[in-house]
């Protein structure tokens, strides 16, 4: 199994900003300076060449935020 991680580009991180503001307001953690949200995708049944090709194609697609 191969695993690939994606992170939204800077400027398009509304979900991370919202979570950061919520945590600051409710938990009051002075050392908290930001939040990063990563998406993990697991790929099975691909050889290394297929995974490399697919990973490059996936990384060029814009991610939707739910």
Image (cartoon, helix red, strand yellow):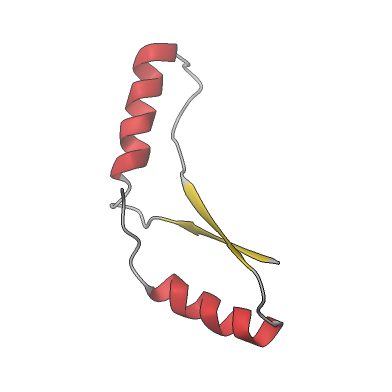
Q: Residue at coordinates 33% horizontally, 36% vertically from top-left?
A: 17
Count of labels shown? Answer: 0
Q: Quadrant of residue 16?
A: top left
Is residue 40 rendered to the left or right of residue 18?
Answer: right
Residue 57, relative to residue 25: is it above or below? below
Residue 35 placement (x, y as % from top left): 45, 36
Outermost residue, front side:
45
Front residue (pair 55, 33) = 55
Identify the residue shown where x is 65% and y is 79%. Answer: 46
Residue found 39% across the figure and 55% down from its top: 8
Q: Position of residue 4 (x, y in %)?
A: 58, 63
Q: Nearer the viewer, residue 24 or 55?
A: 55
The one nearer the camera, 8 or 44, is 44
Is 41 placed left or right of 10 in the picture?
right
Residue 62: x and y in percent read 33, 67
In the visual, does 58 lie left or right of 61? right
Quarter containing the N terminus: bottom right
Residue at the location (46% across, 44% down)? Answer: 37
Residue 26 at x, y percent in the picture: 38, 13
Image height of 32 relative to 44, above or below: above
Q: Nearer the viewer, residue 63 or 33?
A: 63
């Amino acid at each position: 199994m191969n695993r690939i991680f994606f992170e939204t580009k800077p400027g398009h991180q509304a979900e991370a900003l919202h979570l950061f503001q919520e945590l600051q307001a409710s938990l009051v953690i002075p050392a908290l300076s930001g939040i990063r949200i990563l998406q993990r995708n697991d790929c099975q049944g691909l050889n290394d060449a297929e995974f490399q090709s697919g990973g490059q194609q996936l990384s060029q697609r814009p991610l939707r935020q739910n």
